[in-house]
Image: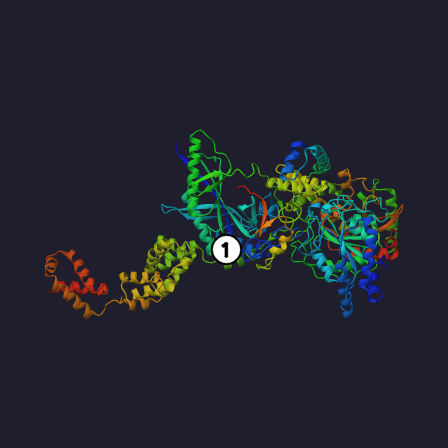
Amino acid sequence: MSWETVIGLEVHVQLATNSKLFSGSATAFGAEPNTQASIYDLALPGTLPVMNEEVLRMAVSFGLAVDAEIGKRSVFDRKNYFYPDLPKGYQITQLEFPTVGRGSLKIQLENGSEKTIGITRAHIEEDAGKSLHEDFQGMSGIDLNRAGTPLLEIVSDPDLRNAKEAVAYLKKLHSIILYLGISDGNMSQGSMRCDANVSVRKKGATEFGTRTEIKNVNSFKFVEKAINYEVQRQIELIEDGGRVVQETRLYDSDKDETRSMRSKEVANDYRYFPEPDLLPVIIDDEYIAAVRATLPELPAARCARFVSGYALSAYDADVLTSDRAMADYFEAVVTLCGDAKLSANWVTVDLLGLLNKSDLSISESPIKPEQLGTMIARIKDNTISGKLAKTVFEALADGETNVDQIIESRGLKQVTDSGAIEKLVDDVIAANPDQVAQYRAGKDAVFGFFVGQAMKISKGKANPAQLNELLRNKLKAD
Amino acid sequence: MALDKNDVEKIAHLARLQINDTDITEVAQRISNILGMIDQMQSVDTSAVSAMAHPFDAGQRLRADQVTERNQRDYYQTIAPATQDGLYLVPRVIE
Amino acid sequence: MLSKTVAELAGALTRKEVSARELTQAYLDRIHQLNPALNAYVTITAEQALAQADAADARRAQGNAGPLTGIPIAHKDIFCTRGVLTACGSHMLHNFIAPYDACVVERLEQAGAIMLGKTNMDEFAMGSSNETSWFGPVRNPWDQARVPGGSSGGSAAAVAASLCAMATGTDTGGSIRQPASFCGLTGLKPTYGRVSRWGMIAFASSLDQAGPLTHSAEDAALMMNAIAGTDLRDSTCLELPFEDFTAQLNQPLSGLRIGLPREHFTKDLNPAVQAILQEAIRQLELLGATFKEVTLPNNYLSVPAYYVIAPAEASANLSRFDGVRFGYRCANPANLDDLYKRSRGEGFGDEVKRRIMVGTYALSAGYYDAYYIKAQKIRRLIKQDFDLAFNEVDLILGPTSPHTAFKLGEKVSDPVTMYLEDIYTIAVNLAGLPGMSLPAGMLNGLPIGMQLVGPSLSESRLLNVAHQFQKNTDWHTQRPEV
């Protein structure tokens, strides 16, 4: 039996504002419990919400980035339920009239093709606080610092067909959000959280299967694993004659499995109704145009520009532009050294390799773009060879800072004096008469041997182009 | 619309209100009376009328993204029933 | 002295016939003497009041006193007062020392008014007789066997019995106007959005408005000058330039067109009340007003629509009372559910629980359209009725309440009968309009009010009409013997 997977993602993005959605409390991560909880956040009686204009701007900029319809009249609603991390007993959210309506974004599949994923909507809502389950004489502790932090909940259509697509979509969203600067996107701190709605159906079926919702998966890797586990679980369940139950499940990354959350109410009745403390948010074309004017160049456009402007391969351009910080890094390097191809190689291969090895982000890179740019410029002006540049790169990675000093102190400067190289070539030819004979007898492969010998003697510093030319001439001449 | 004991229990649970078993019948009766009065509305045809959530039609005023609150945790927690280490305590939350 | 109006007291203070401290002490003495019987105040802030009085006297000496500087006031216990118990008539908040001041409290303090204490009220403002208060009922100073009306019953009784010069109230369905009618006072519910709701414990957010309870329209205007105006902490508070509500008090009434809603003057209205209104109409005619019949055909639906919308909003507004961060918490909760259910079950009184349940039901799956949406549509019809009427007239005049104050215990056992008490006042809240009640006559020794309703933001006009009426009648000058 052949199965098809259907996945829709609900992604909660914490917006990077200074203050909360409806109060003037700070939103900093990691503060002492309840020190960022004002009387509004604590839901003291008589307090009222006043909306942060920056949240609206951020939501609209996201909407524009995914070509979405922008709600010119968005309405806040109350979603009612009791939970200790929800101080008012309702969450202010947007049900019927969200700020961001239908949009879409394109993801790149492994086979190189593109797929468009529909975005159903994105709405503004308040985050909840946190329940800490350490033991306080058998009680839980409630920290409301996070309560009221602005969230944008981005809901996708059920267009994703496997875990890899889901991850590609998530990475694309992550990239857009970072480009827009509307969130730090930090999944481990919960600034971006993902719920996955997963179902399976027989290939060719038109009806959706019963779905389960996997809550709060906090890394790209776990999203993939959680979905794969859940898909397998559902298929096995059905093939064994069972039925999938619509429920909320939690992914346990230690055990690599999902399990049912029994505490969530069987049938929630959230009793949504329009928030009477807030009037509708009305925006006009002028507002939308003003936000549009502030949008940065987005990944798709930047990628296209990298291909056309820098003559990069589509692959390199995609890798470089998926992360705004990386693309900025790359462009800083190019500006310094003037060679896009070389810069792309160094950034995507050496630098990314280094960062991956030490699990660092581009902004945490030990090598700054000015240093890498200078280093590549030294390759371009023949001060060092590409090969010895690796030594410079490693020194930079180890914390040294001045490229020219590294070259100087380690004597990495390339020999370009043709007299010196000529002497080197003469010495190598004189010392290896057998190989000279072989070469002259037509065994071209021996040429590499001479290059190797010359490089060995010069400790790699001979300019390769000059060396090659002189060697060929001398070997031919005699 | 007359409510029975079951309905009242369901609503009381949604609203997290404890209602004593001995009171339920009376509560059901009183709420049913209120709903009976409310049901006068049902005789009016409102199919062409749009819902009015608010007394006036206006847009929302927004505020600048500024931190205006300072930490007053200790003061605010003087009125809290149970706290420890700056946290509000509740019976264990089961995930 | 204590039975004087605010305007008269301000004069006496200016002429140095009395100091704010003397005045405050005199009111405190009277409260001490009479409050045990009336139960109008639940908290008396004597020490703070005297300190404020001294500050007011100093301010007057410096020459920068306003008309309310040194005037003793009582605040309905629905307004948060920093450092002072704010219980909202509920066991749920019996220990809630608010850590902040309501905007209304703040503004009156800035104006120099002296807070004598907090007044009793129906629990969470849910009631029309002040009998749902956890602190026990308030008694009407005109007849202590009777209710003062509700929910601002404590404030109304306090002003009527001269236990303060003026008081704040709130009005969600008539809670300022009906007690004003029962206690012989002038009470104004402003246009929705005129007065900030910041710090006013919410009952039904789209209906609640704070307003004055005073002896005269002039006093109400003086209070409005202090409390009205934009507050950025309330998103629903209107942005308007400062308005001096006393400026138009002395405008003549010639040319004024007043509408009499056909639906309010039927055989259902007590004939004695009807006669009193006719006399008031005659008086206003002498002052130059003309009258014509108008129609509010959907008014009869205002009580049903209100008893969906108000409880629906209240059911969410009152979810924050959960025994976690403030307020009442049940003893030894067995688990989270038990904490919620018992804290709320024990903390709220029956009427509050009833309304929370009605609201929860009206919003629940399967009933939302039939109840909540339906009520909102009817709300629009009610608003449209007023819009049409105000195309033809400047104001509407009618009864505030079907009758004078009723006896304690008379209606409390039947919620629906109690709800119908507000048949003339509720539509005004649904439409967000300004409405006021002012004394129009006496019936068997009890005061009875008439209601004036105007279009949005017409408070100055309402106060003008009321003031002119009061210049030519003396109903508002009558005081009960307590």
User: Residue C323: horizontal and vertical position, in percent?
Assistant: 64, 45
Q: Nearer the viewer, residue B74 or A178?
A: B74
Q: Which residue is mark 1?
A: A182
Q: Can residue C373 be seen at all in this image of the molecule? A: no
**In the picture shown, does residue A352 fall above or below C131?**
below
Is residue C44 among the parts visible in the rendering?
Answer: yes
Relative to C406, is A6 on the left or the right? left
Furthest-top residue in this view:
A241
As shown in the figure, which amino acid type bears the numbered disc 1?
Answer: Ile
Residue at position x 52%, y 54% from top?
A: A15
Left or right placement of residue A381 versus residue C476 in this view:
left
| Mark 1 crowdedness (10 Å alpha carbons): few <14, some 14-19, many ≥20 | many
Q: Chain of mark 1?
A: A
Residue C209 in percent (x, y) is at 72, 52
- Tell me where residue C256 sits by quadrant: bottom right
Where does residue C9 sit, x and y in percent of width and height? Answer: 83, 61
Pick whichever, A56 or C65, lies toward us.
C65
Q: In this view, which residue lies farthest toward the front?
A: A137
Quadrant position of residue C318? top right
